[in-house]
Amino acid sequence: MIQPLTVDGATLRVLSSVDEVSASEWDALHSDEDSPFVEHTFLSCLERSGCATRERGWTPSHLVWSRGGEVVLAMPAYEKSNSEGEFVFDWGWADAAMRAGIEYYPKLVVAVPFTPVTGRRLLRASGLSLDDAAKLALAGIRQVVSQRKLSSAHVLFPRADECEALERQGMARREGVQFHWNNEGYRSFDDFLARFQAKKRAALKRERAQVAKDALRIETLRADALDPSMAPELYRLYRTTVDKFSWGRRYLNEAFFRALLERWRHRVEFVRAVDDKGAVIAGAFNATRGARLYGRYWGAFEERPFLHFNVCYYHSIDDAIARGLTVFEPGAGGEHKLARGFDPTCTYSAHWIEDERLDRAVRAFLAREVVAVRAAVERELAESPLRRKGAAQGEG
């Protein structure tokens, strides 16, 4: 139990389930451009399916501030007993803490479990300024960390402006890199390909043509074309990827996919590759909101050349252009995305560490790390096969 805390007339509650607040109250704090993954239903599906629970190392501890009976700030938060499924890697910090005799776990994370997607972490009412929200956020974080005797708190994948506001409150800032596709007014996929140097453009055309050579059809199913009965197939596809690698983890279960198809299918897009007999041989689970598309999980029952690139990238880029979407975020990692027209894009996190010794060490590390991260972004931009606007338009 967290002792009551009131700051600037707002009172903190720490919820053991997102369902302890109504969906209408939680979702009223969203902006139209926000990530779909902070929606009440998505978080509820993670918890109800058993994926984000104490037993799995994710104890729901959502921070909700109310004033005059109205929710003014909500933060999806979890007490963590490990660093699994976060995608902002701090195992080195945990190791340093252990060697210094500091208990690193449990800790608090403000994040969406298993979802390395930038989005608002300070869901605030329109009348609450960002700096006031950051002030409340850190006050709540410090109260929970102190009362539960946690080592630290970590706000993962917030928006840049949120990270800056939290940094002004005293949290340490960290930067990372993902690769996102940006629609620069393309009228067609060929228009997009025209941005590539000739040699690379020819290579991408060959990769894309492999679908027809293999007698495959790639299609996207949405909304009414989706059905909860597809959950087992989606889960099997997901498993083919996570089971392939030694570091893979089955963070999600079939119940989670079924819950999304029952409660959240207006956000879901199932991209699948079908052979000439109608059998699904590969697929990708995507989500969409507003003008952004998010690639999440991919799997294949059969190995085919360039199948991953076609299902996960080219098909969705083509579709995004046709629908006028502005950004396609295909997920974390993968410098191979750079060669296929995705731009290096900064991601952020903010950190509060109670122990002064560990805090100093982490801040010194972050000061060095950010130099390397920004240098990598500059290098990757220079190495991008995309001809930048304003550059010479020769064949290159």
Image (spheres, rainbow, N blue to C red):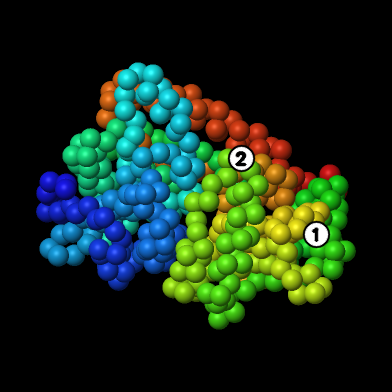
Residue 313, position as x, y percentages in the image: 68, 57
Nearest to the observer: residue 77 or residue 281: 281
Q: For the point 26% across and 46% down, which residue is it?
A: 137
Badge 2 local density, few (<14 within 10 Å), some, or many (20+)? few
| Residue on which disc 2 sits | 246
The answer to whether the residue labelled 1 contacts the one labelled 2, judged by CB atoms less than 8 Å apart, is no
Quarter assignment of residue 292: bottom right
Q: What secondary structure is marked by label 1?
A: helix
Along the horizontal axis of the image, is 144 left or right of 391?
left
In this orientation, does residue 392 appear?
yes
Q: From this view, report whether residue 144 is shown above or below residue 314.
A: above
Viewer-side label of 1, 2: 2
Q: For the point 37% across and 24% down, which residue is it?
A: 97
Q: What secondary structure is marked by label 2?
A: loop
Q: Quadrant of the C terminus?
A: top right
Along the horizontal axis of the image, is 49 left or right of 137?
right
Q: For the point 54% across and 47% down, which residue is it?
A: 249
Residue type of the residue flagged with mark 1: Arg
Q: Earlier in the sequence, mark 1 or mark 2?
A: 1
| Residue on which disc 1 sits | 208
Residue 357, position as x, y percentages in the image: 31, 20
Q: From this view, report whether residue 180 is shown above or below residue 217.
A: above
Q: From this view, report whether residue 118 is shown above or below residue 29.
A: above
Along the horizontal axis of the image, is 336 left or right of 347?
right
Badge 1 local density, few (<14 within 10 Å), some, or many (20+)? some
- Distance from disc 1 to disc 2, alpha carbons, whole Å, reads 30 Å
Nearest to the observer: residue 161 or residue 3: 3
In this orientation, does residue 126 appear?
no
Residue 393, position as x, y percentages in the image: 80, 50
Residue type of the residue flagged with mark 2: Ser
Residue farthest to the right, as pictured:
213
